[in-house]
Image (cartoon, rainbow, N blue to C red):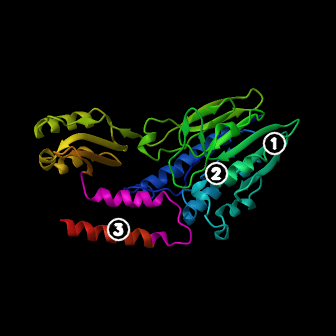
Amino acid sequence: MRIVHFSDTHLGYSAYSKVDEDTGLNAREMDFYRAFERCVDRILKIKPDAVLHSGDLFDSVRPTNRAISFALEQMIRISQTGIPVVMIAGNHSTPRLRETGSVFKILEHLDDVHPVFQEEYGRIELGDVVVHALPHCDTEKMTNELQRMAPSKGKKNVGMLHAGISSLQIFRMGEFNEAVIPASYLRQDFDYFALGHYHTYSQVTKNSCYSGSLERLSFAEAGDQKGFLIVDLDSKKWKFEALDARPMIDLPPIDAKGLDAPRLRDEIAATVGARDIKGAIVRMVVKEVSASLYKQIDFNWIASLGGEALHFEPKFELVSQNGSVQWKSSSIGNLQKEYVSFLEQYPLDNVDKDRIRNKGLEYLERGLGESD
């Protein structure tokens, strides 16, 4: 009995201002669609007995029509093969008020697709396998629902949940609405636990894994491989299947202490030039920069160094004479991009997100103009 376990696909995510040449859409949004499609392509070739998606199908509670349409197209591809799919809602896809409703109801109309999104434990039988599915909910409710989970005798039992796990190592994303539970709730009498929420492929206990996300969402994931898991429930072993993802490069930090402007320029050129950054998302951090040195930096030249990257993010640690530290970006425009990127990461119920975005950008421009 083989299952495919994948998670945290965040369809509809967008960031930065670069446009995809083929579609005219946000380049990062297209990255996430293409990653999902590549995963489905592989699923159709593998032909597993079941597919599990352990949360955050969409990046927000109210995804765009484009994101919904894309998700339906891809899920129909799997549905038409007769391979059963179980999906749970993650924290990015769960409304704070039940009255808001869930986009997951659309998926209920697809054959062999079983969405679980009502913030309570659901039990789905797939022949000899029972999937015990628990979507995102607050930590207290999640622990209560987990206590209701009990393996079915004579069956293969698979648990699914979307949460952070605390053990000898902490697996969490640091998001304000995440649930975090002790690893002791991952019962050893289950054949496997398919975990979602943490974006890096990780084995948590003897029988539980995070598959990770299909694309990189932060520089904390810059060195991660992205992909999904093929789990053999008979042998209780699994294999990580890597997928292509857009390169994300966190360059080695540059220490500017004791450097003058020409030497710092050489260090920056060498650091950026040592990597192939074409099409990549790149961050460069320069530490211990004095105020006088900062005034001598040619930011236009630095921007030109990163011109081939999809996104180039230079950050400078300014150190004052009294030892205080302040972080600055090399261009004012980055502040606006960071605001838009931040806003896209968090679901907002019953709110016009475009209006919030536009109003925030208006305030930023006004404030930045006054500071010039």
Is 35 covered by the magenta stretch? Answer: no
- Looking at the rendered image, the quarter that the C terminus falls into is bottom left
- Which label lies toward us, 2 or 3? 2
Say if residue 85 shows up in the picture.
no
Per the rendered image, the range of residues in magenta is 330-354
Q: Secondary structure at mark 3?
A: helix
Q: Secondary structure at mark 2?
A: helix
Residue hosting label 1: 150
**Cα–Cα span, label 2 and label 3:** 34 Å
Q: In this rendering, would 367 be left or right of 222?
A: left
The three-letter code of the residue at mark 1 reads Ala
Residue in view at x 38 percent, y 72 percent: 359
Residue hosting label 3: 361
Question: Residue 137 or 71: which is nearer the viewer?
Answer: 137
- N-terminal of the pair, mark 1 or mark 2, is 2
Say if residue 264 shows up in the picture.
yes
- N-terminal of the pair, mark 2 or mark 3, is 2
Above-or-below relation of 312 to 366: above
Question: Residue 121 or 215: which is nearer the viewer?
Answer: 121
Q: In this rendering, would 47 be left or right of 338?
A: right
Q: In this rendering, would 193 be left or right of 204?
A: right
Q: Residues within 10 Å of mark 2 (few under 14, many from 20)?
A: some
- N-terminal of the pair, mark 1 or mark 3, is 1
Determine the image quadrant of residue 20: bottom left
Q: Position of residue 89 (x, y in %)?
A: 65, 54
The three-letter code of the residue at mark 2 reads Thr
**Cα–Cα span, label 1 and label 3:** 50 Å
Is 352 covered by the magenta stretch? Answer: yes
Query: Which disc is residue 128 wearing?
Result: none
